[in-house]
Image (cartoon, helix red, strand yellow):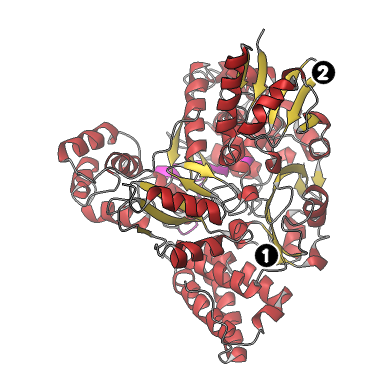
């Protein structure tokens, strides 16, 4: 049970209406299908394209406003493609107790990357999350869905060097 | 016969290299021509020892840890497969002090078995509770759970049996069982560990609830921050269906119960039960006003049992061993055991299941060994982001629902997060308000607006701007949020804030002008 995670961003965010319809059609029969559909679309394309909203609304017999409301309500759903790699850093209390805010400062001041944004070369998205359930080995993160524990400055530097900059 | 080696597949263990260790063992065994079977078990809960590798010997399981890939060759040299001596050898797992001193009922199998092997689960007493329930009348099952004194492990502490009784008594063509596996209180990881390490216990508990109230369909709503747990649960549900523990005839009862796992989408508020129901229905996860109770009008408007992971997971043991045996554990009206989670700045962090009544200090000092940095422990937050920060003089408080309320805290999910003396409680109080502002569903004003005003007001206090006036504003705001919020997020956010103000006032009185780091 070591399959890799799903949260790596899609390659170029190429939206494909036919493929989107296929995904939506395959899941529309579920009870409360909105979230499973949004997850599946994001997994396929790396984000939820605006153009998918009317397709979902039509399939589920809901208004576009209701679907748009869902996409914008949940932190997980992106409206634009993520970087090629995604680092989710936990900033909740147990990670704070082990200095995660110092690491965030390092990302922002030393590496000049925004938490909540994508690196200029599109290599790495860095997102804040609030608890990954790895609180005894904090600070914790997920890199492309794979857990990383006892994060320190060196680990942060390595991740950033590896996934941004000249290395495409 | 090949040697059985256990390398946890728990995501905390993976986060410190368990997959690499498993690969290294596999390669080294192949290189030496040694036959091994590697089982990816859950974690035993001794997280500071992860990756904790165990081997099965005639004398019992012997543990080595923390193991790195670089240690693997020397472990083979030391004949660790037979339990040989090595610098990382810890002795028999069961004899370790940390394990021996616990009372593991819910977590008895976690870390012991292969998480998705039905055969392994059965061999360790699994499904005994469900099989018993399959031969009982629904009202008898409910009575057993009620008699055990089990209370909701999510924090509110509502008696589980009473909730089930309400659903049993409701007339409807369809009823649901919903497991709240989105109570992502920071500092807690028992749900995740159980779903990854012993998912059948949760499935069994939900099936028991289904038989008890006449529900045929269940959902487990898992937070998306636990992707690994979600995958294990999906696999376990498929296995349980194949074994007939889920499906048209649950455990030979002649009754149907099936379930699905659903993934949340990063909204903390969906750990609130009515938000979760709206989210499951495919809507924004906004809080519903109560009444009507979910027990009468829950998922899709139907009577619904909604409990959290640890509540459901306690019921197989209760059914198998009897309500009285469970109620013998505990303190006062807090019956049974609680899986406590030691986290944050702590030397030996992990999961400790014990009867209610253990003190915070016993957990932090005896089990946890104090802070990881070696500095003095200054504050301990109990019960997640909505729990109180306790100073040293309150650490002798026993952990129980009423006992926590008496010191203006709450037990929550049993998370215990330790901070050393570098913590700034004004900053922690600000974070509590900020977190509420980020995660508020927006439905009620005290929570939506109050939390943002709370951040601003604490910023002014920290900056030294009209401190007395702003302190009065903050006190008032906390009162309004407590009394006027629709759910526990806005209603309990003042708990960490007020505890910080009460127990650590000096942090709010430092010379002004020291601005917080930009946020």
The span picked out in magenta is B288-310
The local crowd at label 1, few if under 14, some if 14 to 19, many if 20 or more residues have their Cα within 10 Å, is many
Looking at the image, the residue that sits furthest to the left is A18
Give the label on residue B476, or none: none
Q: Residue at x 61, y 38 (%)?
A: B13
A22 left or right, relative to A5: left
Asked whether A61 or B64 is in front, the reply is B64
Q: Residue at x 65, y 61 (%)?
A: B387
Precedes in sequence: disc 1 or disc 2? 2
| Tag 2 residue | B59
Residue B407 in percent (x, y) is at 75, 66
Residue B378, located in which quarter of the rendered image? bottom right
- Badge 1 marks a residue whose secondary structure is loop
B227 left or right, relative to B91: left
- The subunit letter for the residue under badge 2 reads B
A110 left or right, relative to B494: left
Quick check: can you spot residue B115?
no
Looking at the image, the residue that sits furthest to the front is A166
- The subunit letter for the residue under badge 1 reads B
Q: Residue at x 74, y 51 (%)?
A: B347
The local crowd at label 2, few if under 14, some if 14 to 19, many if 20 or more residues have their Cα within 10 Å, is few
| Tag 1 residue | B388
Residue B298 within the magenta-colored segment of the rendering: yes
Residue B81, located in which quarter of the rendered image? top right
In the image, residue B178 above or below residue A104: above
Residue A46 in percent (x, y) is at 30, 45
Residue B37 within the magenta-colored segment of the rendering: no
Asked whether A92 or B68 is in front, the reply is B68
């Amino acid at each position: 049970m070591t399959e890799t995670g799903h949260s790596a961003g899609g390659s170029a965010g190429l939206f494909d209406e036919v493929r989107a319809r296929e995904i939506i059609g395959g899941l529309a029969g579920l009870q409360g299908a909105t979230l499973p559909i949004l997850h599946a679309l994001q997994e396929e394309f790396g984000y939820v394209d605006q153009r998918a909203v009317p397709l979902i609304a039509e399939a589920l017999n809901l208004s576009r406003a209701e679907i748009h409301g869902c996409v914008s309500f949940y932190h997980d759903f992106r409206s634009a493609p993520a970087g090629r790699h995604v680092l989710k850093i936990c900033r909740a209390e147990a990670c704070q107790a082990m200095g995660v805010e110092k690491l965030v400062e390092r990302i922002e001041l030393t590496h000049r990357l925004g938490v909540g944004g994508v690196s200029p070369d599109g290599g790495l998205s860095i997102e804040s999350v609030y608890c990954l359930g790895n609180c005894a080995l904090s600070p914790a993160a997920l890199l492309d869905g794979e857990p990383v524990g006892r994060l320190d400055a060196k680990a942060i530097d390595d991740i950033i060097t590896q996934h941004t900059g000249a290395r495409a | 016969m090949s040697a059985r080696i256990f390398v946890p597949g728990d995501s905390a263990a993976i986060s410190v290299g368990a997959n690499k260790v498993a690969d290294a063992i596999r390669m080294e065994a192949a290189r030496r021509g040694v036959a091994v079977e590697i089982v990816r078990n859950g974690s035993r809960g001794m997280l500071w020892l992860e990756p904790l590798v165990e081997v099965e010997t005639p004398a019992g399981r012997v543990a080595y840890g923390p193991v790195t890939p670089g240690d693997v060759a020397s472990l083979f040299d030391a004949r660790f497969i037979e339990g040989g001596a090595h610098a990382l050898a810890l002795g028999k797992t069961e004899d370790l002090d940390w394990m021996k001193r616990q009372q593991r009922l819910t977590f008895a199998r976690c870390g012991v078995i292969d998480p998705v092997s039905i055969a392994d689960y059965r061999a360790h007493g699994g499904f005994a509770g469900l099989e018993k329930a399959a031969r009982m009348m629904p009202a008898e099952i409910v009575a057993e759970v009620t008699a055990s004194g089990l209370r909701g492990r999510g924090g509110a502490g509502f008696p589980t049996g009473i909730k089930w009784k309400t659903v049993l008594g409701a007339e409807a063509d369809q009823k649901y069982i919903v497991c709240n596996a989105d109570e992502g209180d920071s500092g807690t990881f028992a749900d995740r560990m159980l779903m990854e390490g012993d998912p059948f216990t949760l499935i069994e508990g939900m099936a028991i609830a289904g038989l008890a109230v006449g529900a045929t369909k269940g959902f487990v709503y898992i937070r998306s921050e636990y992707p690994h747990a979600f995958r294990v649960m999906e696999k376990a549900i498929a296995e349980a269906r194949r074994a007939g523990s889920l499906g048209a005839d649950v455990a030979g009862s002649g009754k149907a119960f099936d379930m699905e796992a659903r993934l949340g989408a990063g909204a903390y508020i969906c750990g609130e039960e009515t938000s979760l129901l709206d989210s499951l229905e495919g809507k924004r996860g906004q809080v519903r006003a109560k009444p009507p109770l979910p027990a009468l009008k829950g998922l899709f408007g139907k009577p619904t049992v909604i409990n959290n992971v640890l509540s459901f997971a306690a019921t197989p043991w209760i059914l198998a061993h009897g309500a009285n045996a469970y109620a013998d554990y505990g303190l006062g009206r807090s019956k049974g055991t609680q899986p406590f989670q030691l986290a944050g700045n702590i030397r030996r962090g992990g999961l400790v299941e014990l009867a209610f009544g253990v003190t915070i200090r016993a957990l932090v000092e005896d089990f946890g060994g104090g802070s990881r940095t070696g500095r003095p422990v200054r504050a301990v937050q109990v019960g997640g982001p909505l729990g109180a920060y306790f100073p040293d003089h309150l650490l002798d408080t026993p952990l129980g629902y009423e006992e926590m309320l008496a010191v203006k805290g709450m037990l929550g999910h049993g998370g215990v997060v330790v901070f050393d003396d570098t913590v700034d409680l004004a900053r922690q109080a600000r974070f509590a308000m900020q977190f509420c502002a980020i995660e508020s569903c927006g439905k009620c004003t005290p929570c939506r607006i109050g939390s943002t005003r709370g951040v601003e007001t604490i910023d002014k206090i920290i900056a030294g701007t009209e401190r007395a006036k702003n302190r009065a504003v903050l006190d008032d705001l906390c009162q309004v949020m407590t009394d006027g919020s629709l759910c526990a997020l806005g209603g309990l956010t003042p708990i960490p804030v007020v505890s910080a103000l009460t127990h650590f006032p000096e942090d709010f009185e430092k010379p002004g002008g020291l601005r917080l780091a930009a946020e």
